Amino acid sequence: MGIVKIADELHEEIRKASGAMSRSINAQAEFWLKMGMLAELNPTLNYQQLTARLLRQADVTLAGEIDDPRCA
């Protein structure tokens, strides 16, 4: 674990988003970092597909999921 220095303006946006999403500030920042990394590694997938992939990797059963080979 380490300390990451970010701009005050970005920290404020993380703080506001964390309240809206019921996450801690650190959890919100970690989520955005993870999603950003996934988006860079999978530029053809949209947000919903990336989220579905994360849930599937956590062994969450997605009710009503449409089979999409791009999410596998």
Image (spheres, rainbow, N blue to C red):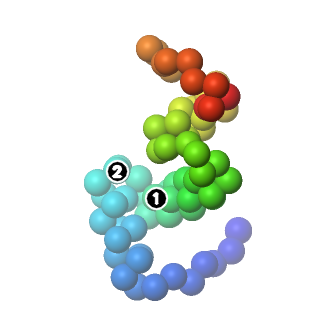
- Residue 49 screen position, x and y as percent: 52, 36
State whether residue 41 is above or below residue 71.
Answer: below
Q: Is residue 3 left or right of residue 24?
A: right
In which quadrant of the rendered view does residue 11 lie? bottom left
Neighbours of disc 2 within 10 Å: few (<14), some (14-19), many (20+):
few
Nearest the viewer among 22 and 38 is 38
Residue reaching furthest to the right: 1
Tell which circle, 1 or 2, labels the residue nearer the N-terminal end. Answer: 2
Residue assigned mark 2: 21
State whether residue 43 is above or below residue 53.
Answer: below
Q: Amino acid at mark 1?
A: Gln
Q: Quadrant of the C terminus?
A: top right
Q: Amino acid at mark 2?
A: Met
Residue assigned mark 1: 28
Q: Give the residue displayed 43% in from the left and 64% down from the top.
A: 25
Q: Give the residue displayed 34% in from the left and 50% down from the top.
A: 21
Q: Secondary structure at mark 1?
A: helix
Q: Is the residue under label 2 in contact with that under label 1 (CB below 8 Å)?
A: yes
- Residue 22 screen position, x and y as percent: 35, 50
In which quadrant of the rendered view does residue 52 lie? top right
Q: Real-space Cα distance between discs 1 and 2? A: 8 Å
